[in-house]
Amino acid sequence: MNKSLNLSGYVKRYFPVIAFIAACALVPLFIKKSYIQRVFIEVFFFAAMGSAWNILGGFAKQTSWASPAFFCIGAYSALLMDKNFGLSPWISIILGIILAGVLAIVIGLPTLKLRGVFFSIATISCTSIVRQILFNTPNLTGGAQGLTLKMSSGNDLWRLRFDSEIPFFYISLIWMMLVVLIAAMLSKSRLGWYLKAIREDEDAAQSLGIRTYHMKLRAFVISAMLLAVTGAFYSFKIGYIDPNSSASHDLAVRIAVTAILGGMGTIWGPVLGAFICVPMLEISNYYLSDFGGGGAGFAIYGLAMVLVVLLRPNGIISLFQKKKAGGANG
Amino acid sequence: MAEASKVLQIKELDKSFGGVHAINNLTFDVYEGEILGLIGPNGSGKSTCVNLITGVYVQDKGEILFEGEISLKKQPIEARAKMGLGRTFQTPRPFLDMTVWESVYTIALLYNKTMKQAAAQADQIIEMIGFSNIANTVCHKLPIEKRKWLDMARTLAINPKIMMLDECLAGLNPTEMDSSIDFVRKLNSQGITIVFIEHVMAAVSKLCTRVVVLNEGSLLSQGDPNVVMQEEEVIKAYLGEDYVNAYVKG
């Protein structure tokens, strides 16, 4: 079962990944339209968030709807530090990571004792609580108005302000690949195996010595930290943050659906999901914007979700996977 | 047998679920190296007893001592597994989406310093149990007998001192039963104490060195299986009053 691969074996094995990254990296050379570039950035960010969600939601099948809470922690701490102290987001991201980790522990300690659907319900209220806090602290967080990033002209990597979409294109691409790499390494790690055992049968896993509660908590914290970082980048990309768009159940659903549609518990499923979900929403909103008061995009989104759940419960990525014969494939 | 040390002492154990008194002042010992049959009619508290020993439930009263001194009451389920208390379930609980090898490997990871050692232990267990040819089969494709064995294989990865087998023969055909009995013997010969919960009496008398009979949550009898199963009380509990004469005299 231990495969030792030589260099050419590695190249062969990871060729699709290398080709995919190369293709993505070359996109700005060929597509100059900044709108399309923005869609790609959105795809990369959602792929990152879907992958982060997948660590607990896919590997261990513990469906969390608290992702927006962590996303907001990262976004708000980065924007607030920038606004009040002129601190670079590269530094305040660390603060966001710590705060998200602490919040994940605070949320996770009581809720991860709950099983299955009860954990899900508890996480829904977490997003609601963060939303209410944001709405009701206008002096600090700007309340319903949110926060807007003061733009300046010129390119400033340290303060994450750029004149074109291209720097953020590469930042989001690199971040997505980093999250995917973390998820891939995790799935091969001890924690990854324990999470999969929890997914398959939590009672059996526990009876064999897996500390299921601790493992779920660890996964939740890692997932929360990755979401917080994404939140910080994302808010600097779009230049503002407000509770209606970020601390919303809508975002929670979009993040989870990215992973579920693509393929829960797989490494590339969330990425595939993002490449389908984000453009689908953009296209349908563009062509159907006059139809049904602009909600047609979400109707198509919902329809796609139903079809996938009915026809491909393991996600669209299962179309491309060979039947699992054995070995240690994530 | 009297010389052997007590690996598990169950003392005045009590457990109620609402109005149901599932375990009632139960006391018995498990000796190191034996194959103890835990028998009794349906609802007599056998599985509850295992669930109390493994920590799924916590007793209302009484004490469970492991290796003479460690009180299990405050230990969580996973800590008890780490001490070497292994169990299987009445209905097998495979990790359906993993392969046979992966299932064992996952548990072996808990008890080995390096992943390489865990892989080696998994290989060894798979070979010992005779699963080498199906090591890469996904568990949801396994038939019931193989699932039961896989549960045992996974439990072996925890390096168990005691293995509690909850009806590991139920639903098997006679050939499968024989091979399973041989397998349990093999485990026992490696020094693992077995607590064998079973309804198939032929297997119990063939395999067990001692039995403990439960009825309505209390200890009814214990001792040599062939002697105990002739006792009037035991027959009464299992088959009802009318059968006592037929069995004892006939």
Image: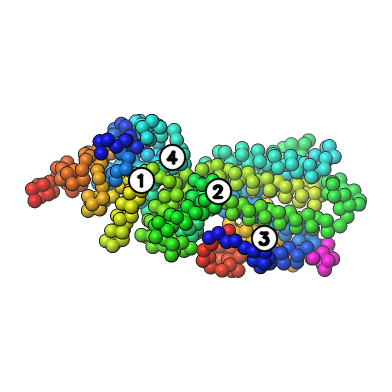
Left or right: A269 as drawn, with respect to A85: left
SS at mark 3? helix
Mark 2 = which residue?
A: B114
Residue farthest along the left direction in this orientation? B249
Q: Is residue B78 magenta?
A: no
Q: Chain of mark 1?
A: B
Nearer to me, A300 or B134: B134
Q: Residue at x 32, y 40 (%)?
A: B32
Q: For label 4, count other residues whose C-alpha is less than 10 Å away and answer few (under 14), some (14-19) or many (20+).
A: some
Circle 1: residue type = Ile
Q: Residue at x 25, y 41 (%)?
A: B212
CB atoms of marks 1 and 4 within 8 Å: no
Instruction: Where is residue B161? Give x, y as percent.
Output: 38, 43
Mark 1 = which residue?
A: B192
Mark 3 = which residue?
A: A271
Left or right: A121 as drawn, with respect to B229: right
What span is colored magenta in the figure? A26-34
> Label 3, label 2: how many angstroms apart (C-alpha)?
31 Å
SS at mark 2? loop
Which of labels 3 and 4 is toward the front? 4
Nearer to me, A261 or B182: B182
Mark 4 = which residue?
A: B83
Which of labels 1 and 3 is toward the front? 1
